[in-house]
Amino acid sequence: MTDESAAAPRKPRVALMGEFSAGKSTLSNLLMGARPLPEKVTATRLSPVWISMGTGDPYRIDVDGTAEPVSLENLEDIPVQETRVIRLFMECDILEVCDLIDFPGISDPNMSSEVWERMLTEVDAVIWCTHATQAWRQSEAAVWETMPDAVRENSILLITRYDKLITDRDRLRVLKRVNRETKGQFGAVFPVSLLKAIQAGEDYDLWDASGAGPFTQHLIDTIDVLTKLAARTELPLYNYGNDTAIPEAVVAPVVPRRVQRNAEGNERPARPTTPEGAQTDASGRIIRTS
């Protein structure tokens, strides 16, 4: 690893969360433009899957921190209780600006909540999927209540499978209720049909009609905010309690332009900075700017 890469700020980490069958797998396909897992592998049967930009081989990290290589085709054979996270690598646009962590369903009766709770410390923000026909259940609200404000204010709630609501009246009723019950708990709430968004292809009217247009634009803006926050701290935002301030951005000390010191310590006037695109004569005097 070069010094330059070691000094590079980390990317923000966005978690995909929600209950079983809420659309998280479809969301990951939409965001990455491809399915990150083999067709036969069901993400709900796995430990959290952390996906980053790259071409590296997949591996798992044990609960004690031990890493070992794994096969994509045999991911479902990985022991869930003993595995903290599975690391995968892909090359796609969104992974250039953030990492995605795909969590299993929060209320799976066949999986201890500890499997996903232990990965929350790696999270900066969440895209939470809630199924439109049973949107924002009490079990979801109970988990979200434990999230620190630093995560909440940069997170997004998606009301998925919105097209399953038949009438405009039903759609409006669900949207109003969810907005009321989650007021102030998310950065934004969007109703969306993820499957229709994927099917839209290059049809931008269908893309916007699916709800994906407003959602993805807000996500882009959110990632920009998260990138600036991530540059301020190596700790993901989940680790900042409501009474803990995120460090201020590091600002390099500014030397006054009026006076600089030479090697002997004597004060001398500072040389003005030449504007970008300017042309100077032999004495350094600016004769033209572009």
Image (tube, grey):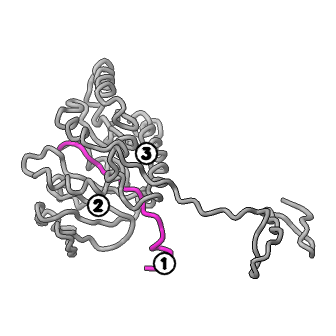
Q: Quadrant of the C terminus?
A: bottom right
Answer above or below: position of 251 versus 270: above
Residue 264 within the magenta-colored segment of the rendering: no
Q: Secondary structure at mark 2?
A: strand
Real-space Cα distance between discs 3 and 2?
19 Å
Residue 199 appears anywhere in the view: no
What x and y, as percent, mark residue 265?
75, 77
Q: Quadrant of the N terminus?
A: bottom left
Residue that carries the numbered disc 3 in the rendered image: 219
Please give the name of the residue rendered at 29% of the width and 42% of the height, measured from the top-left corner.
Answer: 128
Real-space Cα distance between discs 2 and 1?
25 Å
Q: Which mark is on residue 198?
A: none
Answer above or below: position of 169 versus 253: above
- The three-letter amino acid code for the residue at tag 1 is Asp
From the viewer's perspective, is 134 left or right of 2?
left
**Circle 2 Cα neighbour tier, 10 Å, few/some/many (<14 / 14–19 / ≥20):** many
**Circle 3 Cα neighbour tier, 10 Å, few/some/many (<14 / 14–19 / ≥20):** some
In terms of image quadrants, where is residue 95?
bottom left
Residue range (magenta) = 1-20
Residue that carries the numbered disc 2 in the rendered image: 50
Residue 8 within the magenta-colored segment of the rendering: yes
- The three-letter amino acid code for the residue at tag 2 is Trp
